[in-house]
Image: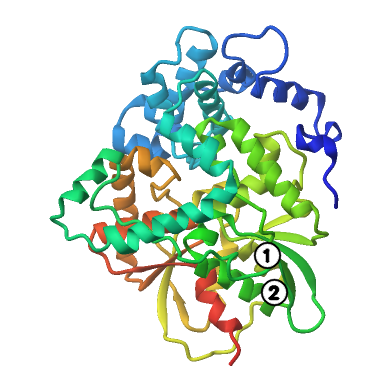
């Protein structure tokens, strides 16, 4: 499919209602005279629906740690209401309060009015960005590093070199480790190691199975599977090929845009979305698969809901890999006498509440003969990662993550599986920080051995 010329600069008029088109103007600063904070004003009806009941307080992981009204949805809605009425301004304090949200969507799950809290918070953050109240470091990352996607692989390789050759070799007492807090990185934090070779370095764009393909499936790898957790990407490709799918891995795809537009930089998020649309639309695909919960919710809903593009922005239905397998595979595996493991599962917020997928990954896990599945208490509670949240508010993130680590430990499992690379980073850090031995794996990594040739 060839992208429409118009879509390079705006969403197709055929795919949006007149109201959507008006909202698009508000989001990006086009149009005539508007209120001072027009992005927030466009969502004023959502603000008015808040009953001030406070049910969100009981489920908000941030509020549980900060015990401040502004930490929960009700408090943030009150702040946004003040902004829309011009009784509050975009002060540094306001910006800090709005940044303390994981976008875990727990509040939306219990809200009796069904308020789109995520859209309200992201709208306020976009105002912060539009009015220039945005940290310089984030501007550099979003506007230069992420927007110019071709920079990511070489930067990732440079980071991999620094990690392997410099930081990992430094003794704990080294004075150079004292520099880490200066760049707001906890010196004891466990970070994933960037791969020396990217997923795309080792794979072509079109990969064919043995025999006639059942379907032609695009694989949206996302940044993490391409640059860090390449084993996840290899496992996805192996499983899809084993299922008889032709796999398309466009090398000109890039970041999904979630880090940018959830932080408030919607123009950059929009450009990244367009890059991905162009990368996938040129292929005639039966489906698009991803193994990243945040990337999945972006492709399925956020491109349309937040950035104003049409449905099926990549030219086909998007599936999480476990959702895809539950629908298109029989999930029947012979016992390969793999080492038996006890596995528990952590629900990523953007897969569970973001996409409504909870049973599919568990179905995949239960289908594996070598896995003993153990359900954990509060499996759906946020781990505290939240993408850049764990970088900017690590003290809060650690406390939320500690609770999740304790739930994992209580299961007695050998492995905690999940479906989100961002959650994997957080869980690995929290387990090691709390002295726990559990291994963190993506569901698809546990499944891949069943597709290897005997």
**Residue drawn 26% across and 65% down?**
436
What kind of element bears circle 1?
helix
Tell me where residue 407 sits by quadrant. Answer: bottom left
Give the side of residue 142 with respect to residue 323, left or right.
left
Question: Which residue occupies the foreground of this view, 314 or 447?
Answer: 314
Q: Quadrant of the C terminus?
A: bottom right
Q: Is residue 222 above or below residue 334?
A: above
**Residue 252 quadrant:** bottom right
Query: Helix or strand or loop: what does disc 2 sit on?
Result: loop
Residue 329 circle label: 2
The colour scheme of the drawn protein is: rainbow
Query: Is residue 122 left or right of 188 when viewed as pictured?
Result: right
Q: Residue 136 at x, y = what percent?
A: 43, 29
**Circle 1 crowding by C-alpha within 10 Å: few under 14, some 14–19, many from 20:** some
- Foreground of the two, 335 or 427: 427
Q: Is residue 32 above or below residue 234?
A: above
Residue 324 marker: 1
Q: In the rendered view, tell whether residue 348 sits above or below residue 13.
A: below
Give how far across and how far down residue 232 sits, in percent. 53, 67
Q: Is residue 367 shown above or below 174?
A: below
Q: Position of residue 314 (x, y in %)?
A: 74, 50
From this viewpoint, is residue 24 visible?
yes
How far apart are the two marked residues, 2 and 1, measured between alpha carbons?
8 Å
Q: How would you rate the neighbour count of disc 2 (Cα within 10 Å): few for under 14, some for 14-19, many for 20 or more? A: few
Taking the spot 41% from the left edge, 48% from the top edge, the residue there is: 385
Given contact means CB atoms under 8 Å apart, are the residues at marks 2 and 1 in contact?
yes
- Which quadrant of the structure image shows residue 32? top right
């Amino acid at each position: 499919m060839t992208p429409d010329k118009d879509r390079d600069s705006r969403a197709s008029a055929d795919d949006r209602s007149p109201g959507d088109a008006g909202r698009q103007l508000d989001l990006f600063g086009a149009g005539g005279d508007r209120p001072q904070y027009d992005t927030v004003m466009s969502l004023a009806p959502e603000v008015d629906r808040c009953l001030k009941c406070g049910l969100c307080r009981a489920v908000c992981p941030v509020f549980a740690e900060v015990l401040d009204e502004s930490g929960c949805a009700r408090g943030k809605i009150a702040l946004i209401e003040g902004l829309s009425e011009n009784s509050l301004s975009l002060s540094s304090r306001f910006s800090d309060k709005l940044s303390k949200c994981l976008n875990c969507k727990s509040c939306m799950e219990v809200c009796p009015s069904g308020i789109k809290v995520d859209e309200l918070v992201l709208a306020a953050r976009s105002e912060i960005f539009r009015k220039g109240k945005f940290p310089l470091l984030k501007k550099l990352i979003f506007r230069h590093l992420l927007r110019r996607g071709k920079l990511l692989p070489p930067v990732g390789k440079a980071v991999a070199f620094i990690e392997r050759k410099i930081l990992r070799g430094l003794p704990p007492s080294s004075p150079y480790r004292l520099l880490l807090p200066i760049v707001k990185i906890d010196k004891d934090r466990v970070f994933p190691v960037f791969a020396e070779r990217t997923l795309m370095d080792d794979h072509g764009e079109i990969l064919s199975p043995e025999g006639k393909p059942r379907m032609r499936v695009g694989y949206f790898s996302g940044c993490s599977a391409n640059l860090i957790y390449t084993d996840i990407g290899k496992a996805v490709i192996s499983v899809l090929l084993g299922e008889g799918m032709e796999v398309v891995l466009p090398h000109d795809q890039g970041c999904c845009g979630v880090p940018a537009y959830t932080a408030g930089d919607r123009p950059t998020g929009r450009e990244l979305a367009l890059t991905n649309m162009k990368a996938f639309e040129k292929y005639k695909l039966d489906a698009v698969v991803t193994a990243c919960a945040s990337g999945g919710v972006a492709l399925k809903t956020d491109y349309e809901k937040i950035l104003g593009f049409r449905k099926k922005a990549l030219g086909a239905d998007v599936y999480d890999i476990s959702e895809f397998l539950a629908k298109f595979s029989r999930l029947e595996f012979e016992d390969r006498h793999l080492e038996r493991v006890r596995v528990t599962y952590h629900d990523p917020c953007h897969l569970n509440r973001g996409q409504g997928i909870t049973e599919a990954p568990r179905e995949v896990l239960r289908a594996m003969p070598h896995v003993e599945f153990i359900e954990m208490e509060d499996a759906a509670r946020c781990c505290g990662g939240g993408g850049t949240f764990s970088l900017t508010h690590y003290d809060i993130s650690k406390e939320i993550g500690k609770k999740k680590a304790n739930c994992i430990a209580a299961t007695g499992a050998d492995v905690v599986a999940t479906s989100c690379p961002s959650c994997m980073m957080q869980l690995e850090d929290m387990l090691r920080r709390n002295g726990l031995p559990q291994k963190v794996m993506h569901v698809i990594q546990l499944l891949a051995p069943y597709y290897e040739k005997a």
